[in-house]
Amino acid sequence: MPSVDFYILPAASVTDTLPFVCRLAEKAWRSTQRIYIHTDQIAQLDTLLWTYRDEGFLPHQPYIATPPTVPAIEIGIAASPADRFDILINLSQQMPDFYKQFKRILEIIPGNHVDARTAARERFRFYQTQQCTIQTHQPETV
């Protein structure tokens, strides 16, 4: 079973959490992990991954079924991405059916959004029933 980390952020929406997602993705990418970011905010995240650092960008692309040659970060809302990733960053309020194929899942929760918190609690309970190792983090900044 994957290990699951819940990040409850002081943000009002998923869009507000995107800079934090970029930092998580960068950290995982630097440790040579392959990352799939599950989101319907593809355009916004794509733009931010190109521009969030003044000195560079994170190699990424929208998800495609065939493996890319360079990007270790892919962004999509695929029903079931190919089994080639290490980390799932979930920005959706839904439980991805394909969660078991990842070694690690990072659940990003905009803490000031009531519906997102409610959905996160349901996913937390589900992961518990699946015997996943779960940790919760509450960073003070986004």
Image (cartoon, helix red, strand yellow):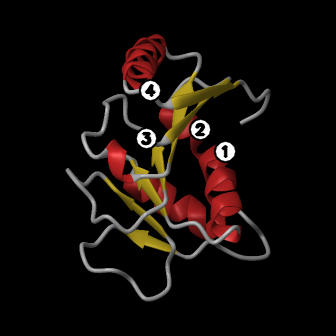
- Residue under label 2: 17
Q: Residue at x 63, y 28 (%)?
A: 135
Taking 113 as reference, is 29 left or right? right
Taking 34 as reference, is 28 left or right? right
Residue 131 disc label: 4
Q: Nearer the viewer, mark 4 or mark 2?
A: 4
- To which quarter of the image does residue 59 belong? bottom right
Q: Nearer the viewer, mark 3 or mark 1?
A: 3
Q: Secondary structure at mark 2?
A: helix
x, y percentage for residue 112? 58, 16
Residue type, label 2? Thr
Q: Residue at x 28, y 46 (%)?
A: 98
x, y percentage for residue 56? 72, 76
Q: Secondary structure at mark 1?
A: helix
The mark nearer the N terminus, 2 or 3, is 3
State the quadrant of the C terminus: top right
